[in-house]
Amino acid sequence: MKVRWVMSKFNSHLTSSLLSSFLKNRNQNSRNLSLDTRNAGIVFNYVDTSRLLSLCGRRGHLRPGSSLHACIIKHSSLFDIRNLDNIRNVLVVWNSLVFMYSNCGQLSYAAKVFDRMPIKDTISWNSMISGYLRVEEIETGFGFFKRMHSSSDFRFDPATLTSILSACDKPNLLSVSKLIHCLIFVNGYEQEIPVANALITSYFKCECHNSGRRVFDEMSQKNVISWTAVISGLAQRQFYDQSFNLFWKMRSGSVEPNSLTYSSSLSACSGLRALKEGRQVHGLVLKSGFDSDLCIESALMDMYSKCGSMEDAFRIFKAAAEMDEVSMTVILVGLAQNGLEEEAVRFFINMVKMGIDIDPNMVSAILGVFGIDTSFALGQQIHSLVIKKSFGVNPFVNNGLINMYSKCGNLEESMKVFDRMTHRNSVSWNSMIAAFARHGRGFEALQLYEKMRIESVEPTDVTFLSLLHACSHIGSVDKGMEFLDSMAKVHGISPRVEHYACLVDMLGRAGRLVEAKRFIEGLPLEPGVLVWQALLGACSIHGDSTIGRFAADHLLLAAPESATPYVLMANIYSSEGRWEERARIIKKMKGMKLKKETGMSWIELENKVHSFVVGDRIHPQSETIYQVLEELIRLMRDGGYVPDESFLHYDLDQDFNEEHL
DNA sequence: ATAGGGTTAG
């Protein structure tokens, strides 16, 4: 109540959400927040003001922060330091004001306040130094550091170093972190736990995880924060296995994990797609009682959804007391990436209808569903949302738009988005290369890769998949081989089965089946389903039952539940006219109760998506559609086109077949 | 001094 009273005197810029986070924050600190009785009756309170200012600073809320500043100016009489009782209070408010401006990135204001402060302490200097470093004005920041050092009244202390380190959170500030590391060492601060923890965090944020790990290993005393800093740092840098191993190691020690440790280790499980380990952590979370923490719930839902178990994710979703932008994004991504595209679209539309503030993360997540069976018109609406909300600078959103347009068949629009981008990352290039490849424009895909090299963007394993895909379209096996070679030798990326499968597919399409077989036998790793399927597919195109049989046998071992080897072998036998063999294999497949997945096609007309399966009569305009189809078939035959009978479908009778082919 | 989310290929 007291806080609300103080705030109402301040200004309407202090929103209710700020108030609620303030109150929540107060409970966490469990420090009593009471009005200074000596100032009762005066519309001002030093303690609340400084706490609100610090809160604004931490969250980067400049507007309410500067409103508080205005209020301070109004009550300037209270800042008379001739009243010695007041000195401490006055200093605390001034310091929070400097901190607020510096943490909001407003260094010129921070400096003005700092210069006019009647008294300063080390904390005042610390805010100025870290503020300038955070906005990467490194020279100025160090200027303050030197000035502080040379003035005889102040000396840096461990807090100065931790506050500098907390500003060093980007790789280009690594040199500063290293310098501070030296100062820590020279001054014998290395065993101060908060200092070492800040150093660890800074090294990880600067992508120098080895140094971070070394600092951690050399600490004689470690607390939860030390452990969590490394576990989360490793997970954020995508060293998921190391992160999870360390978490496991921590459990055999004496330091108890907290909710932050659990959410970090769950994030490692997500990255590893490790369902079993994820469930184990879930068990620990239940025992610890952190299970109704929203961060934990989001981490759990994400873990389950990335591991492909949406049922488990839904269970947590239903039990959750509240949702926020992160947990909603987790669900949205889960739906979009687990084959529930329609639900994802519905979820997104509901979010918009409920008035939820859509953020760039949600947009890039929903853009991923386009091109499956969604409406292109909706995709365009989302693009207009992007423009309205000024998300056009976000690389994730732009990359999503490139993919959305290219998957919906609009390559021109993809190119426009790509060309307009000011900061392209490797995913942008990969997406555009893939877009050209997808549209059969292999040469342009390769040209774009040349440009990518000129602009010194490092390719990734996905780049090479798209490039191989492009080579496959041009029919240039040699070029593909070259890429596979340079991938390992020049860029140090070891090819995965997917890359090898692409090459097998390429050799196979070119009819070089013997070579493809030899290539597979020389592979450094287990070929797996994709590779054998590529070889078998090629044999089915070229009608080679000898190598086909070889591939089918391996495929059966790798994927005993798949109908593909049976269907493709049946096709090969058909093309060779070996009807008995064909009948035998179909019988065997039916005996195994395997069924080929039905192919489907979609078309969008006037905002409505129509789907079709071979031979179906479900569509309300079926009658007309088949009439047009027959007319087209007649025209084709008149034009000299004959059905390719080598692709006779296994479960259709002869009369039916010609129509379908 | 420590936490949960987003885009690419197949």
Image: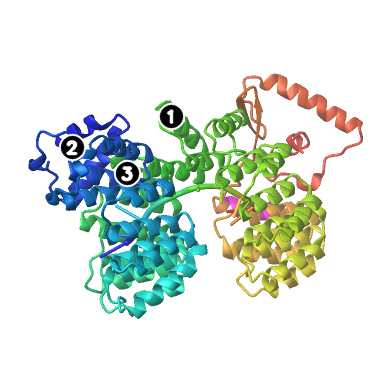
Q: State the quadrant of the N terminus of chain A.
A: top left
Q: Earlier in the sequence, mark 2 or mark 3?
A: 2
Please tell me whether mark 2 sits on a helix, a strand or a loop.
loop
Q: Looking at the image, which is closer to me, A417 or A256?
A: A417
Q: Residue furthest left?
A: A37
Residue B4 percent coordinates (x, y):
39, 52
Query: How crowded is the residue under tag 3: few (<14 C-alpha within 10 Å), some, or many (20+)?
Result: many
What number is the disc on residue A350? 1
Chain to which mark 1 belongs: A
Q: Amino acid at mark 1?
A: Asn
* Residue that badge 3 annotates: A56
Q: What span is colored magenta in the figure?
A: A583-590
Q: Quadrant of residue A497?
A: bottom right
Q: Tell me where residue A406 appears, x and y as whole percent.
A: 68, 41
Magenta segment includes A657: no
Among the two numbered marks 2 and 1 on one chain, the one whose residue lies closer to the N terminus: 2
Q: Is residue A282 left or right of residue A6?
A: right
Tags 1 and 3 on a common chain? yes
Residue A643 numbered mark, or none? none
Residue A589 drawn in magenta: yes
At 67% from the left and 22% from the top, the residue drawn is A622
Dominant secondary-structure state across the stretch colored magenta:
helix
Quick one: A134 or A268, which is closer to the camera?
A134
Numbered mark located on residue A44 in the image = 2
Q: Residue at x 33, y 59 (%)?
A: A125
For the residues labelled 2 and 1, the Cα–Cα distance comes to 44 Å
**Which residue is nearer to you in this view: A15 or A266?**
A15
- Amino acid type, residue under disc 3 in the picture: Cys
Determine whether, in the image, residue A518 is placed left or right of residue A263: right
